[in-house]
Image (tube, grey):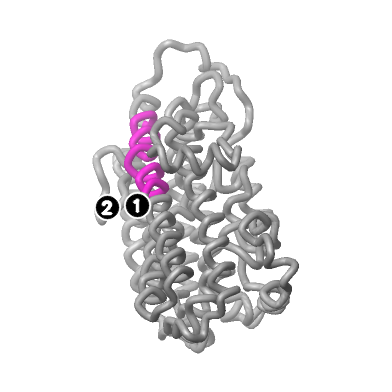
């Protein structure tokens, strides 16, 4: 989570109510509504969260491999491969920002791998320091969040929307990038483990986590599936379902009012995500696409599945569900219509239209969230 947004995420996490007991904890039966929502929660974990985190971890491994190849054999082709893998991994991460509650916030993974703006001055000082670079592979995890993660890598392999020439990337930069990629892989594997359980991971991913002695303490997938029962951090089934929408609203608000809004309003014209790769608008679009997947109940879904939160809301308040669907499509279209690259066009009037569309989507999601309690 970016520097201005930590408070809001922790407030969203508070919504889930970290209490282990409720009046229904020991009940052997659920109401018909609760049974339906329990299915929604379970399918959300199985078809949205875990697949996205699994693919994120898989692509982080490929990104690490690409940077290892670049370190060992500097070539423009290997830079191109690293750039391709950066964008592929980044897309899964941006989709996952629709559910930053749970592991991403509890273990501070979000700020560790996705803080911006990049602290270029401190990074350049680091790269020039023989002492600091001497053991970078073992110290990278302790660096300032503004130096590592996706944006640390971005600065090494991209400039002005293009891949850098291999001849321009120094040996220290290559070593640094590989160390950052290894650290990123660890974080992504931990996300998958914290939702799917360690046993669900490949032996390679398990070894990465175990070697770092960073096994997750929780299984958030089980917690969500067992919402309303003893041991779950969601004390009712409905609260688990509400968290799905709350997670969506958190990122929609951030995209509209901070990621896009801060530069557009002049509040902070340096607060631009992925400026060196010219990937900002794709990031924004992927964030809202992640909301679509969460709301429609499956990674890759472009329409509501029968076990989605959308389908349930359609059954209790069709107007609210239809409004979210329309707002989702409009929001993605307005973001896509912004002139590229964002870093050079953030004051364009179409940017304001995208902000309005984000706010309209948030309002529609708020109404849908309220429908869960009917």
- Mark 1 lies on a secondary structure that is helix
Q: Position of residue 358 (x, y in %)?
A: 46, 66
- Depth order, front residue of 45/89: 89
Task: Decide which of 34, 213 is in the foreground and name it.
Answer: 213
Q: Where residue 332 sits in the image (x, y, percent)?
A: 36, 68
Q: Which residue bears the numbered disc 1?
A: 293
Q: Is residue 261 visible?
A: no
Query: Could you say which is closer to the camera, residue 75 or residue 147?
Result: 75
Which image quadrant: the N terminus?
Answer: bottom right
Q: Is residue 10 above or below residue 316?
A: below
Numbered disc 2: secondary structure: loop
Query: What quarter of the picture does the C terminus occupy?
Result: top left
**Magenta region:** 37-54
Q: Is residue 345 left or right of residue 85?
A: right
Which secondary structure class fits the magenta region best?
A: helix
Is 80 situated left or right of 270 in this image?
Answer: left
**Residue ID for mark 2:** 301
Q: Is residue 92 above or below residue 202?
A: below
Q: Position of residue 268 (x, y in %)?
A: 66, 78
In the displayed structure, 355 sits above or below 142; it is below
Q: Is residue 188 visible?
A: yes
Q: Quadrant of residue 117?
A: bottom right
The residue sitting at 36% across, 51% down in the picture is 55
Q: CA distance from mark 2 to mark 1?
A: 6 Å
Q: Which mark is residue 43?
A: none
- Decide: marks 2, 1 in contact (CB < 8 A)? yes
Would residue 352 be counted in the magenta stretch?
Answer: no
Position of residue 268 in the picture relative to residue 358 (left or right)? right
User: For the point 58% across and 51% down, which residue is it?
Assistant: 109
Q: Quadrant of residue 122?
A: bottom right
């Amino acid at each position: 989570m970016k520097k201005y947004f930590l408070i809001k995420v922790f407030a969203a996490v508070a919504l889930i109510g970290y209490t282990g007991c409720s009046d229904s904890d020991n009940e052997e039966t659920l109401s018909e509504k609760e049974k339906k929502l329990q299915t929604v929660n379970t399918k959300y974990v199985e078809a949205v969260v875990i697949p996205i985190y699994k693919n994120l971890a898989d692509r982080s491994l490929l990104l690490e491999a690409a940077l290892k190849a670049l370190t060992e054999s500097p070539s423009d082709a290997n830079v191109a491969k690293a750039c391709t893998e950066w964008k592929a991994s980044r897309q899964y991460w941006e989709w996952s920002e629709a559910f930053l509650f749970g592991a991403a916030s509890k273990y501070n993974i979000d700020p560790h791998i996705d803080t911006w703006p990049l602290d270029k001055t401190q990074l350049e000082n680091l790269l020039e320091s023989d002492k600091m670079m001497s053991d970078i592979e073992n110290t990278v995890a302790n660096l300032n969040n503004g130096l590592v993660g996706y944006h640390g890598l971005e600065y090494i392999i991209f400039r002005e929307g293009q891949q850098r020439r291999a001849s321009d990337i120094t040996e220290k930069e290559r070593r640094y990038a590989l160390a950052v990629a290894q650290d990123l892989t660890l974080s992504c594997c931990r996300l998958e483990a914290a939702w799917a359980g360690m046993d669900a991971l490949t032996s390679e991913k398990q070894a990465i986590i175990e070697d770092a002695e960073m096994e997750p303490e929780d299984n958030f997938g089980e917690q969500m599936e067992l919402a309303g029962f003893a041991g779950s951090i969601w004390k009712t089934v409905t609260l688990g379902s509400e968290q799905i929408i709350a997670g969506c609203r958190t990122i929609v608000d951030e995209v509209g009012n901070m990621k896009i809004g801060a530069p557009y309003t002049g509040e902070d014209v340096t607060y631009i995500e992925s400026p060196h790769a010219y990937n900002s608008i794709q990031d924004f679009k992927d964030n809202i696409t992640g909301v679509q997947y969460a709301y429609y109940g499956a990674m890759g879904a472009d329409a509501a599945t029968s076990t989605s939160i959308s389908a349930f809301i359609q059954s209790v308040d069709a107007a609210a569900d239809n409004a979210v669907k329309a707002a989702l499509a409009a929001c993605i279209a307005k973001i896509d219509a912004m002139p590229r690259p964002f870093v050079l066009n953030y004051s364009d009037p179409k940017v304001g239209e995208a902000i309005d569309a984000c706010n309209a989507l948030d309002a529609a999601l708020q109404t849908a969230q309220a429908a869960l309690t009917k």
